Amino acid sequence: MIDFMLDPKSGIPFYRQIIDQIRFGVATGTLKIGEQLPTVRALAVLLKVNLNTVSKAYRELEIQNLLETQQGTGTFIGNLEIQIPEEEREKKLTSICTEFFNIASSYGFSTEEIIQELKTKKEVINEN
């Protein structure tokens, strides 16, 4: 399961952020075929958004055959495999890095400190 997070400052509608996170989750293998997603109500409560926001995201993903909803059972990741285009991956990484850098810089961290911390995190991750 993925940890859904919404960024109200991004300018991207919440339903689109939900769609993108599910698509990236499937593409990276974080979400597996057949895995159950939270109900519309549960995800709306978790993210503190309107039910219609989550419903719209799920509905769009169902149209794309990425999700399957089984009445009374829940919503599941469908059998469709996703490949995220390289250009889209690069844009997402640029967006994430820009946001991260802006936040870190606002706390007074230098570029060198940020790079060193990222290298340290990479080493820790590689050890596990």
Image (cartoon, helix red, strand yellow):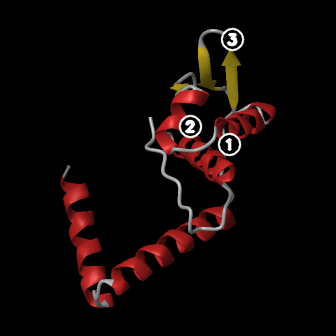
Residue drawn at x 55%, y 74% as measured from the top left: 94
Q: Quadrant of the N terminus?
A: top left
Residue occupying the point 66% across, 26% down: 78
Taking the spot 36% from the left edge, 86% from the top edge, the residue there is 105
**Mark 3, other Cα within 10 Å: few <14 / some 14–19 / many ≥20:** few
* Residue 127 appears left or right of 68: left
Q: Are marks 3 and 2 in contact (CB under 8 Å)?
A: no
- Which numbered disc, 3 or 2, marks the residue closer to the eye? 2
- The residue beneath circle 3 is 71
SS assignment at label 3: loop
Figure check: 11 above or below 26: below
- Give the CA distance from mark 3 to mark 1: 19 Å
| Cα distance between the residues tagged 3 and 2 | 18 Å
Q: From where the camera sits, is residue 61 visible?
A: yes
Residue position marked by numbered label 2 in the rendering: 44
- Disc 1 on helix, strand or loop? helix
Badge 3 or badge 2: first in the primary sequence: 2
Mark 1 sits on what residue? 53
